[in-house]
Amino acid sequence: MKLTRYITINLLSILIIVYFNSCGKSPTQPDSPQGDNVTLNGQVIDFETGQPVENAAVKIIADTAQYGVTTGADGKFSKTFKIVKSIDCKVIASKENYKGDTITVFAVPGRTVDVPTLKIEKLKATTTSGLPASIVLVNQTFTSIGVRESGDNETTTLTFEVRDSSGNPIDITRSVTVNFTLGANPGGGLFIDPPSKKTNSQGRVSVNITSGTVAGVVQIIAEVNLGTRIIRSKPVNVAIHGGLPDLEHFSLAAEYYNIPGLVLYGFTDKITAYVGDKYSNPVKPNTIVYFSTTGGIIQGSAKTDEMGIANAQLITALPIPIHPILGPGFATITASTANENNQVIKREITVLFSGYPSILQINPTSFDIPNRGAQVFTYVVSDANGNPIAPGNTITVTVEGNVKAQGDLSINMPDTQSRRWTQFSFVVQDADPDKDEANTVTIKIEVNGVSGYNSILINGIAR
């Protein structure tokens, strides 16, 4: 009986031991996930000098964990820690009297990561500036603006800096009010805003200039009143350009209106477009003007300058022009551009391509001038189309004999298209009324110049 109870108790003890062993942790089961090491290597340098920064503190934030390390004499650091998955790690470098730097890198278990160089900037020592001593312009958004409704920038911002006698910007403790005034200006409703303003912590203050309806140059002056003393900037010039072309202010002209285009190829004639806006100001520079011609060759386009002027070269060459009204020799030159409504506007002029000089319709061709008498001569000089010859030609009448002459004896051809400049006359009269003897008289008419040479002789008698 006692033996049976002993066996039963020992068997129960064995079962209890087995139960607790089966319910306990396995000796091979880890307390936490496995994970793996990752190593971050990097360097901290000075932002301005590029030199290594020793003893800088480097904080690494990896998910919910944080690690710290300091840099050595070479500015380098290295930190190894365990992660269970790939994560973004934030690396922060800092040091006393420095502005820190932060960068994020991607860390992978079992890898070594090279962290991009961290650059920390040394903080500037703060000092109090001196009293205001000068005002200088430090920035200007646009050096030129367009008149109102020009499609160009109509406002420019000027930033001035107030400095002390050492040339340093005044700080906020020395802040002053800067007043802005207009110097020379074209008017037309331009304005400045604000008229006055206090300097900021950098000693700076800005003013806006908005154009009106008139082009020109406007001067802006910044002033600071310090009791009995006034600090004033140099006048700042801002150009206000004109707007878009307007037909009523669009003109076209030629340097020469009569050119030897039928006898000389390659002769150049300057064609000029004068382009203004609706306010009668020159249009903004670089406005495009297009040119075309019915005779010769012309430069296709040109840009206007500060005065709204665009020049193109007309070159004498084929084709020979024929005008539907004026006839052969007259070329139509056209200049065109676009106005503010995107409409094409144009102007036209005619330029005469004149030819070789002919001496025609001499009357009379023979003569006998009586004693004390006189004779009127008329003649025509024109090209084959009946048009006047080009400027740069001369017409000369020479009379030899015991006579004297007056009238159209020496002519420098003007720049004209009028056929009135094809008809000429002169008078030859007896030079010795006391003698009644027949003398031979020779008259020579010569044309010479850019259009070519021609001449004719007339012989007669004067008594």
Image: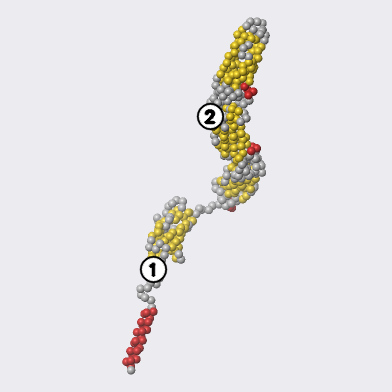
Q: Is residue 250 left or right of residue 71?
A: right
- SS for dot 2: loop
Q: Within 10 Å of the Cα at label 2, are there few (<14), some (14-19), or many (20+) other Cα atoms? A: many
Residue, disc 1? 34
* Dot 1 or dot 2, earlier in sequence: 1
In the rendered image, the quadrant that contains the N terminus is bottom left
**How far across and how far down the image is residue 15, in percent?**
36, 84
Up-down relation of residue 371 to residue 62 (above or below): above
**How far across and how far down the image is residue 231, in percent?**
61, 44
Residue 366 visible? The answer is yes
**Residue drawn at point x = 59 percent, y = 39 percent:** 337
- The picture quadrant where one finds residue 439 is top right
Q: Is residue 347 left or right of residue 20?
A: right
Residue 452, numbered label: none
Instruction: Name the residue type under label 1.
Output: Gln
Residue, disc 2? 317
Q: Within 10 Å of the Cα at label 1, are there few (<14), some (14-19), or many (20+) other Cα atoms? A: few
Up-down relation of residue 32 to residue 353 (above or below): below
**Residue drawn at point x = 50 percent, y = 54 percent:** 123
- SS for dot 1: loop
**How far across and how far down the image is residue 55, in percent?**
43, 58
Residue 259 visible? The answer is no
